[in-house]
Amino acid sequence: MSERRWPVTLTHGDITLRPLRQSDARRWREVRRRNLEWLRPWEATLPPEARAEGDVIPTFGMMVRRLRREAKDGRTLPWALVYQGDLVGQVTVGGIAWGSLRAAYIGYWIDSAVAGRGIMPTAVAMAIDHCLESMGLHRLEINIRPENAASLRVVEKLGLRLEGERAAYLHIDGDWRDHVSYVVYAGEFPDGVLAAFLQSSG
């Protein structure tokens, strides 16, 4: 039986995924400020038509409140990525659909100061295993700009399957950008994605 409860905290060694909370505001803003140029090419932006309709980029507080509501409704899993006690990024499972689809997508970002240490692949693997094994989802996808080498390394390290290309998929860094989609299905990793990653990197 699937487990849809929230909040959920996942831990492996020094790496923890825990619910993002209002008290993270100062640290979250500090990390984002320091990584502005590192993250800018991969950040979602509002297209002109959305701005004309009155949409705005939410404040941190607005974002946390919205994510909390969606989490309680079973539509998203908004995790703070914590390494050795410090918030260093974010992993969000979004677009959760139940019924006959049972699918979702995963997005993530990390502080450049700790990138390349295997933190993000571990965190994403933990999220995948929770979604496929504990929640009972069937399919997860990760959509990445083909120019984003660091993000591509995450899915490649995890052994996720390249499904195809999506032209003009998301409005990123001021324009509609092409993405490549990587997917994983329930049952593809019998012992879990994290176990497979740890074995391959050990």
Image (cartoon, rainbow, N blue to C red):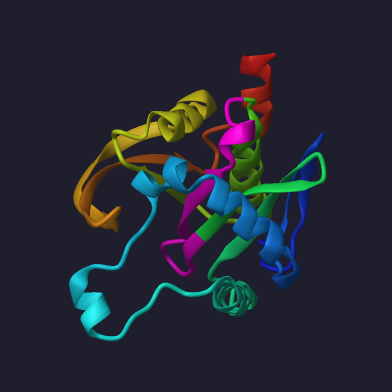
Q: Position of residue 117 (x, y in %)?
A: 64, 25
Place of residue 169 in the rendered image (x, y in percent of width and height, measured from the top left) = 24, 54
Left or right for 141, reference 12: left
Whole-percent x and y of residue 39? 44, 45
Query: Where 49 falls versus 132 (above or below)?
Result: below
Q: Residue 12's quadrant in the figure?
A: top right
* Residue 150 part of the magenta-drawn span: no
Marks counted in the figure total 0
Magenta span contains residue 106: yes
* Residues in magenta, as a range: 94-116
Residue farthest along the bottom direction in this orientation: 54
Position of the C terminus, as image quadrant, is top right
Quadrant in the picture for the N terminus: bottom right
Give left or right: position of 5 versus 176: right
Residue 78 found in image quarter: bottom right
Residue 180 image point, x, y percent: 29, 40
User: In the rendered view, would you say 47 is above or below 103?
Assistant: below
Q: Is residue 3 visible?
A: no
Tell me what residue is drawn at x 63 percent, y 27 percent. Answer: 118
Is residue 23 toward the left or the right of residue 135 in the image? right
Tell me the residue at 58%/31% (across/down). Answer: 115
Residue drawn 54% across and 57% down? 93
Q: Is residue 27 visible?
A: yes
